[in-house]
Amino acid sequence: FLQVTSIWEFAACVPAALMLFLLLKNRRGLRQSLRTTWLNGRVILVTGVFAQLFAQGFFYLMAGGELGGLGVVLLAAYGYCLVYLLTNTRIKDTFSQVPN
């Protein structure tokens, strides 16, 4: 069902996996590098979504311009996620402070 079939998919999942690791690694003794990464979490997630959007567009161009129904849905979903991450203040507030 959910599997990584190419290096593009793996590379696009790394930012989200990093943020999940930081969320689960919620301890009092976080090093400064982890704090800095958390504070830049929104930028990291936007980078991951942009990488997914870029990869989807690249595969669209490589397919000769033929985009099936699933491709349209994926492009719309990635576009929505990108706009949501860039405009939502709740996301910005979430990453403005390091969790205790």
Image (cartoon, grey):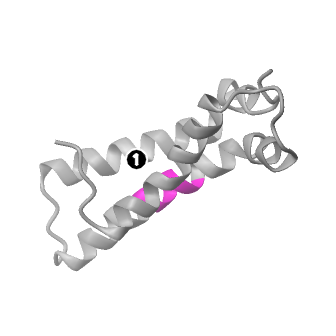
Identify residue type, mark 1.
Answer: Tyr
Q: Position of residue 95 (x, y in %)?
A: 74, 33
Does residue 18 appear left or right of residue 75 in this picture? right
- Residue lying at 14% horizontally and 68% vertically, measured from the top left: 66
Vertical relation: 52 (above or below) 87: below
Q: Is residue 94 left or right of residue 85?
A: right
Residue 17 placement (x, y as % from top left) = 51, 45
Residue extending farthest right: 32
Residue found farthest to the front: 29
Above or below: residue 65 compared with residue 52: below
Q: With respect to residue 21, does 64 lie above or below?
A: below
Q: Find disc 1 in the rendering and name its residue.
A: 78
Placement of the C terminus among the 4 image quadrants: top right
Q: Is residue 64 above or below residue 32?
A: below
- Given residues 54 and 18, the one toward you in this image is 18
Asked if residue 69 lies left or right of residue 90, the reply is left
Is residue 79 located in the magenta-colored stretch of the structure? no
Q: Secondary structure at mark 1?
A: helix
Query: Is residue 53 visible in the rendered structure shown here?
Result: no
Residue 21, image x, y percentages: 58, 39
Q: Within 10 Å of the Cα at label 1, are there few (<14), some (14-19), or many (20+) other Cα atoms?
A: some
Q: Which residues are magenta?
A: 47-52
Closer to the camera, 19 or 87? Answer: 19
The residue shown at (40%, 47%) is 78
The answer to which quarter of the image holds residue 94 is: top right
Q: Quadrant of residue 59?
A: bottom left
**Residue 89 appears in the picture as rendered:** yes
At 55% from the left edge and 51% from the top edge, which residue is drawn? 15
51 falls in the magenta region: yes
